[in-house]
Image: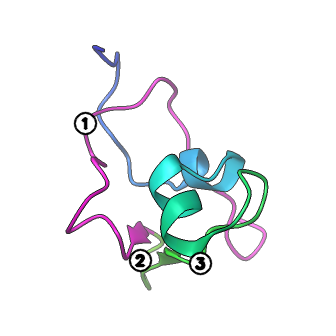
Amino acid sequence: MKFPYECSRCGVCCLMETCQFGITSFKISRETPCPALSFSVDGEAICSLAESIVPIGDGCCLRARALRNNV
């Protein structure tokens, strides 16, 4: 799949729906917030599964920044 925008590391993808890797790894539902998701001090989304199995950073289908501290 070709994405129209670069990944902005906003976290919206993970906030909207837990990926199959998170569901399998943590035995949670698609609607459950994923425990692998966190945010850096700079507000960039971080996935603790990403280094090993999740293909993040390939691109984005929307230009977004996730809400953080009401910003």
- Residue 60, compared with residue 19, is above or below; it is above
Q: Quadrant of residue 67?
A: bottom right
**Residue in the image at 53% along x and 49% along y:** 19
Q: Residue furthest left?
A: 52
Q: Quadrant of residue 52?
A: bottom left
Residue 66 drawn at (x, y percent): 62, 55
Q: Which residue is mark 3?
A: 35
The residue under label 1 is which amino acid type? Asp
- Circle 3: is it few (<14), some (14-19), or many (20+) Cα within 10 Å? few
Q: Which residue is mark 2?
A: 42
Q: Earlier in the sequence, mark 1 or mark 2?
A: 2
Q: Secondary structure at mark 1?
A: loop
- Circle 1: is it few (<14), some (14-19), or many (20+) Cα within 10 Å? few
Q: Secondary structure at mark 3?
A: loop
Q: Is residue 47 left or right of residue 13?
A: left
Residue span colored magenta: 44-71
- Residue 13, compared with residue 37, is above or below; it is above
Structure colour scheme: rainbow
**Residue in the image at 55% along x and 40% along y:** 64
Residue 57 drawn at (x, y percent): 27, 45
Between the C-alphas of marks 1 and 2, the distance is 20 Å
Residue 65 appears in view:
no
In the drawing, what numbered circle is on residue 58?
Answer: 1
**Residue in the image at 33% along x and 41% along y:** 7
Q: Is residue 57 magenta?
A: yes
**Residue in the image at 53% along x and 56% along y:** 11
Q: Quadrant of the N terminus?
A: top left
Question: Chief secondary structure of the magenta span?
Answer: loop
Q: Is residue 12 left or right of residue 55?
A: right
Q: Earlier in the sequence, mark 3 or mark 1?
A: 3
Q: Earlier in the sequence, mark 2 or mark 3?
A: 3
Residue 53 drawn at (x, y percent): 26, 59
